[in-house]
Image (cartoon, grey):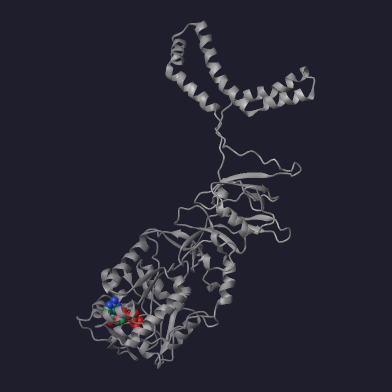
Amino acid sequence: MTADCVVSSSFPLFVPPDLYELLSALPSQLQPHVDSPDDSTFIHDMFGERSLHSLVKVNLLYVFLFSLSEELQVKGGSGGIRELLKLLAKPHVKSLLSVHDTVAQKSYDPDLPPLPDDIDDDEESVKIIRLVKNKEPLGATIKCDEHTGAILVARIMRGGAADRSGLIRVGDELREVNGIPVDDKKPDEILRILAQSQGAITFKIIPGIKEEAPSKEPKMFVKTLFDYEPAEDKVIPCKEAGLTFKRGDILQIMSQDDATWWQAKQDSHANPRAGLIPSKEFQERRFALHQPATHVFQAQKISNRRACKNISRPHTQAHPEIIYAHISSGFRRSFRLSRRDKKTNKSMYECKKSEQYDMADVPTYEEVTPHCRQSGAKHRLVVLVGPAGVGLNELKRKLLISDPRHFSVTVPHTSRPKRNQEIDGVEYHFISKNIFETDIQNNKFVEHGEYNGNYYGTSLDSVHSVLSKNKVCLLDVQPHMIKHLRTAEFKPYVVFVKPPPIERLRETRRNAKVISGKDDKGSATPFSEEDFLEMVSTGQQMESQYGHLFEKVIVNDDLTAAFSELNAALKKMETDTHWIPIRWTHS
Ligand SMILES: Nc1ncnc2c1ncn2[C@@H]1O[C@H](COP(=O)(O)OP(=O)(O)OP(=O)(O)O)[C@@H](O)[C@H]1O
């Protein structure tokens, strides 16, 4: 339906209540002097007429002031009275009263067409609604009742023109449009009549029996975790009433009355009218039906490259990583896949819980609330994800160099023996194999893995330790680990570092070396074409599977630009208000 409502208005009249009482009392006082019932009805109608009330009210004001002046003149007397008489005699006071009287007597009701003659007197109540089309849709949908065949108002979109007017309600039966009976028509045909109508449209409506309960505007906000285009949705009851959104948009849910189709509006849009979106439950069911069995992104096999490479490489001032080594030796500590090692490395980093598909993982909507970090409160955990070789360590390193007192990384645990030059708690926390295994059992690790018979892992305590120093903890993990870090305590800010298109990879990484090592002696070799292809395809896979968990996506094309963007985003994260899952605020 594409019509807009005219809401009638009338000029407000301020009639003293005692005058109303007088007018209402008159008919009964005259009653003893009236013989015929017709005369009695006439008198009642006349004194009950609203326009008479208005006229009397207006005249009373006028007459009252005149008689007041006369009375005061007769009384003569004090300076105050003379002053008042002078005021009342002033031309602009008189003009003001005259304008008031003129305005008060005008009718501001809209010019409505006469009621159709053929209205059945027996019909209990019929609403004739006149609407004027403009660009804004009416914000209502119709349907054909499957039992009676009646055309009913199916839905009123919250905040839309129909809703705001209050003239049309869900369940109202549509009888005529512009005098054309619609009881033999299908909803589509009616919509065509409406589309062809110009200017005013008259609806004849039988009000539905069930009155909609006045609804308070709910204040529920959700972050959308998928893209939605109503035009492509085969089952939406009305495509035109649908709301388009992109993954990551914030919507305000306006109505959940219908279990299948919610009403929502974009938080950032001024348009008050809600649109239809699939409900969470409905979308989950659809998602489950269309999801291939093997949809879970396979965690990459892990090498210990991260665990060892900065520790055992010779320190040379020329190499940027070594500059970092002077700031903190606990770098390259997270454990992600090395492309080069994956065939030979049987171990992989485990996560704490099962990676099996469960409904909680279905990306539909997540209820969110605005959050701004209070000064002095712990920082949000910064989680970096991206395909191997994309530049996570390079970006971390730059952040650490830029502000070593503000940013920090975790110190990993290992079960391998400590070397002479190493200090416990600096390069690693050195623990026995037994203790490592017990800690794994007790879910003490964010990630852990085995390499060359030794365990390596990032413990939750090492994250706590950085955060408790009021520093921003930079952690890079496999993307399937993100969900375990999404807690009220960590409030992770997840940044996906994405590779640029392959031609830009070739160009920018021409002189770059990819570091790999099957033992603690990491070796650096140039990127191969295969590395680039794999980086791009892994990046795409990660984004499609975990994109709903990313708060920021940074394309690492030009390194300096990518670093500036990341740095600026992290500053904003600390100072600005962000939408976070509401469950993170219920700790
Ligand atoms: N934007 C860039 N332009 C040019 N070289 C880059 C860029 N980003 C990273 N590099 C280089 O690419 C190589 C790999 O980067 P880095 O080690 O940071 O990747 P990574 O994501 O940590 O990889 P891995 O997980 O395999 O350790 C390094 O030599 C780094 O200097």
Foreground: 270 or 560?
270
- The mark tally for this picture is 0
Image position of 374 with respect to 382: above or below: above
Q: Which residue ends up furthest to the bottom in the rendered image? A: 344
Foreground: 99 or 144?
144
Residue 443 coordinates in the image, percent (x, y):
49, 79
Judge left or right: residue 545 versus residue 566. Answer: right
Foreground: 332 or 392?
392
Q: Quadrant of residue 531?
A: bottom left
Residue at image location 30% in from the left, 80% down from the top? 503
Q: Is residue 129 visible?
A: yes
Judge left or right: residue 549 versus residue 37. Answer: left
Q: Quadrant of residue 413?
A: bottom left
Residue at image location 53% in from the left, 56% down from the top? 274
Q: Is residue 139 visible?
A: no
Judge left or right: residue 71 versus residue 331. Answer: right
Residue 479 coordinates in the image, percent (x, y):
43, 77
Image position of 323 with respect to 217: above or below: below
Residue 425 coordinates in the image, percent (x, y):
34, 79
Judge left or right: residue 335 versus residue 241. Answer: left
Residue 450 coordinates in the image, percent (x, y):
42, 88
Residue at image location 57% in from the left, 66% down from the top? 280
**Quadrant of the image containing the N terminus:** bottom right
Q: Quadrant of ligand 1?
A: bottom left
